[in-house]
């Protein structure tokens, strides 16, 4: 009882922490009710499960690799969530037989009308495209339907996770929830060919996840993709050039760019290389103006720059005392994840998980110490004041830090752009030329797609 309550408290804290660790945006509707097998790609270890649970709109039971259950804190949390251990050959080949029990528990949860989360790739990775799908998710789905003579109405809901700076605090994540698939649609195929049905459903899952993720020729193309989309959006005025747009609204554009880039990689490798080099050269030249994120406007109005500087300066000035107080109070727990990373040196895919796990220990511990000291020094009034004020000061410090970084870069870009007017005008012209090239590639790609569709 105690451990279950403790785990639920930690889960709520984890969801709250995820909201401050990342800018999370959902595309699509929440996970529907009834028995649902949720499938997702797996680029970011335990963070993936927490984010899916954050946006699902209903309880979801994740499958997680067995070694996580051996961790003192994470194991209690996972059990409290109803998570189920998966015994992978790469962890311990002698324990894979235990997956029979895990699959049976997942099937029962689905028959009971719950939602179960599975990562069909079977591993966490940072590759540019989806890994080969395992068949476990399809086998669980079929077994659950067959347990009740195909009367369950089980649906599969794909969820695509796309990160930007996935290991960094204040990174971004777009969560694309796709349309559901009815497992019963494979009933006839299953009766004719059991293994063929498993392969067919697994392939359908892969296709569904590909529609909700970015799949590129190589990992090195991701910065190129984001740079190309950003300059296109700025030129077409789809967003303010200096705006820090969330990842979710950008995702549909990024996906179209990724699809066209993958086509060009095969259709015309020389043009693919040339455009990539041109975009990279453009971005390098853009750095001369101090641009790290976003783009440059086609023109600057001095009055807007002055107004922007006044508004941002006033907001930063007003918030400065509170930000200093929040930084002093929370400096040690805020820096503790870096200490953990330096000590344990986890793999890249687990960096965010280690940071969040450390924060979930360090911040409550520091908070408890502050409350104890407040009670000792000032009794109940001091305890209540510290309990209410200290978390607010932490949030203010975090938001002030974000605003300061944004305003500092913006004002530097404004100043450099005014100083280097001819250079800025040259870059704007080059951006227009690049966008024209993008549109020509897109038109050719669309014509070929229509031609293939007509032929089929």
Image: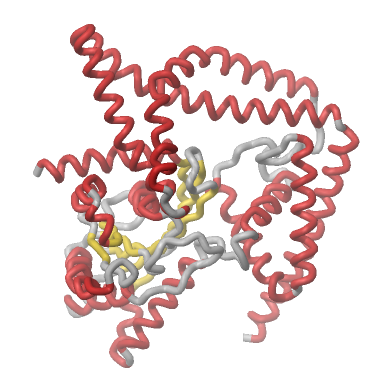
Relative to 42, residue 249 above or below: above
Q: Is residue 108 left or right of residue 199?
A: left
What sort of colour scheme is used for the picture? Answer: secondary structure
Residue depicted at 53% across the width and 66% down the height? 129
Which image quarter holds the C terminus? Answer: bottom right
Q: Residue furthest right?
A: 422
Q: Picture coordinates of residue 2 (x, y %)?
A: 11, 41
Residue 220 % position (x, y): 63, 59
Q: Residue at position x 71%, y 70% from top?
A: 264
Residue 23 x, y percent position in the rendering: 48, 41
Q: Is residue 438 visible?
A: no
Examine the rendered structure and indicate whether residue 270 appears above or below residue 409: below
Residue under the point 30% across and 26% down: 366
Residue most extreme to the left: 1
Compared with 325, 353 (above or below) is below
Which image quadrant is residue 102 in?
bottom left
Quick one: quadrant of the N terminus? top left
> Quick one: 328 or 157, which is closer to the camera?
328
Farthest residue toward the bottom?
A: 192
Residue 430 versus residue 91: which sits nearer the camera?
91
Q: Nearer the viewer, residue 183 or 143?
A: 143
x, y percent for residue 410 = 69, 29
Q: Residue at x 75, y 47 (%)?
A: 283
Question: From the viewer's perspective, is 291 left or right of 131?
Answer: right
Residue 388 visible: yes
Count of labels in the image:
0
Where is residue 253, by image quadrant?
bottom right
Q: Is residue 84 above or below residue 346?
A: below
């Amino acid at each position: 009882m105690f451990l279950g309550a403790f785990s639920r408290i930690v889960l709520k804290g984890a969801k709250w922490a995820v909201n401050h660790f990342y800018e999370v945006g959902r595309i699509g509707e929440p996970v529907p009710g009834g028995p649902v097998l949720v499938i997702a790609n797996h680029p970011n270890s335990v963070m993936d499960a927490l984010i899916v649970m954050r946006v699902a709109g209903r309880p979801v039971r994740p499958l997680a690799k067995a070694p996580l259950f051996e961790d003192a804190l994470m194991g209690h949390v996972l059990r409290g969530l109803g998570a189920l251990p998966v015994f992978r050959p790469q962890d311990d080949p002698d324990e894979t037989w235990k997956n029979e029990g895990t699959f049976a528990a997942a099937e029962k949860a689905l028959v009971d009308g719950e939602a179960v989360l599975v990562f069909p790739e079977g591993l966490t990775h940072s590759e540019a495209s989806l890994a080969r799908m395992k068949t476990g998710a399809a086998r669980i789905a079929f077994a659950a339907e067959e347990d009740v003579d195909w009367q369950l109405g089980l649906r599969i809901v794909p969820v695509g996770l796309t990160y930007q700076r996935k290991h960094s605090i204040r990174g971004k994540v777009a969560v694309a929830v796709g349309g559901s698939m009815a497992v019963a649609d494979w009933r006839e195929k299953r009766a004719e060919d059991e293994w063929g049905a498993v392969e067919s459903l697994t392939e359908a899952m892969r296709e569904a996840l590909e529609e909700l993720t970015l799949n590129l020729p190589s990992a090195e193309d991701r910065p190129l993709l984001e740079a190309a989309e950003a300059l296109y959006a700025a030129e077409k005025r789809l967003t303010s050039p200096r705006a820090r747009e969330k990842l979710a609204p950008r995702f549909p554009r990024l996906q179209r760019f990724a699809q066209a880039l993958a086509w060009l990689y095969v259709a015309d490798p020389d043009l693919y290389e040339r455009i990539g080099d041109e975009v990279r050269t453009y971005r390098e030249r853009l750095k001369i103006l101090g641009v790290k994120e976003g783009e440059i406007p086609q023109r600057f109005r001095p009055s807007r720059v002055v107004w922007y500087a006044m508004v941002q300066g006033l907001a930063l000035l007003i918030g400065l005392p509170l930000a200093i107080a929040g930084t002093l109070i929370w400096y040690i727990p805020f820096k503790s994840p870096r200490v953990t990373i330096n000590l344990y040196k986890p793999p890249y895919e687990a960096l965010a998980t280690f940071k969040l796990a450390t924060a979930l220990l360090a911040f409550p511990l520091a908070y408890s110490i502050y409350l104890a000291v407040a009670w000792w020094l000032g009794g109940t009034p001091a305890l209540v004041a510290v309990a209410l004020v200290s978390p607010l000061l932490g949030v203010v410090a975090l938001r002030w830090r974000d605003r300061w970084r944004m305003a500092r870069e913006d004002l530097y870009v404004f100043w450099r752009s005014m100083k280097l007017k001819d250079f800025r005008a040259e870059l704007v012209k080059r951006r227009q030329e690049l966008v024209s090239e993008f549109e020509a590639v897109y038109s050719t790609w669309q014509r070929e797609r229509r031609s293939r569709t007509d032929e089929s």
